[in-house]
Image: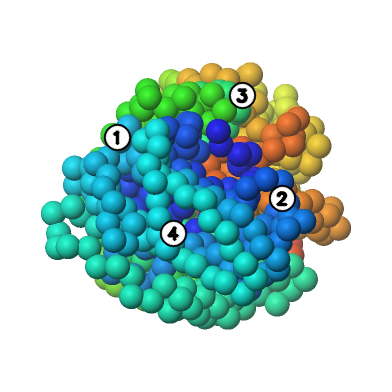
Amino acid sequence: MARPIEDYALLSDCRGSALVSRHGSIDWLCAPRFDSAAVFARLLGRDEHGFWSIRPQGEFRVERKYHDNTMVLETRFISSAGEVLLQDALIIHSPTPLLVRTISGIRGSMHLQTHVALRPEYGSIIPWVRRTDYGLKAIAGPDEWNLESPVPLTGEDMTSGADFTLGAGERIAFALSWHPSHQSTFQPCPDMQEALHRTLEYWRSQAARCRYQGPHRQAVLRSVLTLKALIYEPTGAIVAAPTTSLPEQIGGTRNWDYRYCWIRDATFSFDALMLAGYEQEARRWIAWLIKAVAGSPAQAHMLYGVAGERRLVESELPWLPGYEGSRPVRVGNAAYNQLQNDVFGQVVDTLHEAVKNEVPVGEDAWRIQANLIDFLAEIWDEPDEGIWETRGPRQHFTHSKLMAWVAVDRAIRNARMLGLDAPVKAWQKLKARIHADICERGFSRNRNAFVQSYGAENLDASLLLMPVLGFLPADDPRIIGTVTAVERELVTGRYVRRYDTDTSDDGVGGHEGAFIACSFWLADAWILMGRMQEAAELFEHLLSLRNDLGLLSEEYDPVRRRLTGNFPQAFSHIALINTAFTLLGENRPTGNSDAAGGKYTRPTEDNIEERGYA
């Protein structure tokens, strides 16, 4: 049975990933890509669905951390008889996926055991396993897994295992590798210690690049490393999370596959990478983004595979009972084919951030921008599925209209800054039309707040981004009213829900916890409103939601006091990074700001157009 979500640690080789429990069990492993079928899937099922554990026999306690500022996990098992250190790493720059687990005796003598059940295709296949002089070979169709073991393994109940003893000063190492079954004969890892050392050095070098020097350096650095670990190195794409179907509500049906790349995350990701000093990764992300959306805007998707794949057909895995009974377990994501008009704004906004940061993007980017604006001019006033990818009837979501406004606003800015040949006057008229439409139809005078969709009365936390994006200044009464309404109705304790699932027809059913990124957005809005102390206190509290390794999931259940949703979640860590820099006064809102520290002042007749409020 899987452990609580917060009990897991992430391993990554910047191609695939694994989750390791506090007690030394790898319950999730996808290789060679983040979206490959898991060979260990106990995270979403039972022992029979695959795992690999190394742990002491008898009673013990656990201490764990990442080694220095790396993604190499250290788990210290301590008992009255002795103490051992388990180091787990997915090896960087290995020709094929390679998971190395080393165990070192620290004190006394400890009896340990290892058990492994290789189960390709999300636990659905029992492979053909045979012993070798180095350990085990397992083959299932196109996949071959080789386990190098320094201790003899025996088979029992379709699993393999061994008991062994380790004394002080002794060290042994295991390795698990994958390659296509049709390729040449497997070659054992020549030097596991060298591979581990190389991986440690890689992550240390990445950590050294982080430019944040504020009071929350360790939290920001861990978030930056987590984000780096979720970048698919061959293409530069960023996956939303390395897992699928970890539930937004324990026992519920809100279980989605997040091992893909959302266009919506573009600007947030770019800002976080640039702020933290990772310009190369930011450049590669934009290059991937441009290639992914190239072509007809009408055929653009909302999310893509790590290599730009467009068809991410959603299906269910009925043999998996789900995390703590949360069913169904899904792979693929049907949202790829939805209409989400906000993503066009994210693309153009990201290009604008590139311009401001003097990041060259090439002429193709500006042709794509012009095509996107032409397309938006035709469809911005149509209903869509929106930022939260609802599965009910399409609606006129206010946030989608907001991002259409952002797209046109940033296109105008880009044209002016770069001297592009563009129909700026026509775009200005479109921008003014969208702005007026949102203010008229997206604002409820009864609620004194912007609402989730036109004609509705329910709220949406995505509208906390309005002042951040420069749509209206933070001291505008409508923004103040919106923030106040969110505080009153969507905040539980200090946690912000995306929307009220009881009053919003999202076509999914059930409930969910607080959305962690939205809670950071509230802090950002407070900063712009000059409520710095409240923002700082909220930020500090949100840091307390991280697990002992500094990792955040998508959501938090304030009743159970548990992390929920896919884990770790890039969006949550991106929001943490951006808010940390905003608190330092280094992260300016995407829209123009005239006051120090990012606080907006009310526009005047002289500057209302250049500041983007009309």
Spatial CA span between label 4 and label 2:
22 Å
Q: Earlier in the sequence, mark 1 or mark 3?
A: 1
> Is the residue 590 above or below the residue 93 in the image?
above
Q: Nearer the observer, disc 4 or disc 2?
A: 4
**Residue type, mark 1 in image:** Ile
- Label 2 Cα crowd, 10 Å radius (few <14 / some 14-19 / many 20+): some
Left of 397 or right of it: where is 318? Answer: left
Q: Earlier in the sequence, mark 2 or mark 1?
A: 2
Spatial CA span between label 2 and label 1:
33 Å
Q: Which residue is mark 4?
A: 151
In the structure shown, which secondary structural element does the residue marked by tag 1 occupy? loop
Q: Are marks 4 and 1 in contact (CB under 8 Å)?
A: no
Left of 260 or right of it: where is 513? Answer: right
Spatial CA span between label 4 and label 1:
26 Å
In the structure shown, which secondary structural element does the residue marked by tag 4 occupy? loop
**Residue type, mark 4 in image:** Val
Q: Quadrant of residue 32?
A: bottom left
- Which mark, by number, is residue 125? 1
Nearer-the-camera pick, 185 or 69: 185
In the structure shown, which secondary structural element does the residue marked by tag 3 occupy? loop
Residue 213 picture location, percent across and down: 70, 77
Q: Are marks 2 and 3 in contact (CB under 8 Å)?
A: no
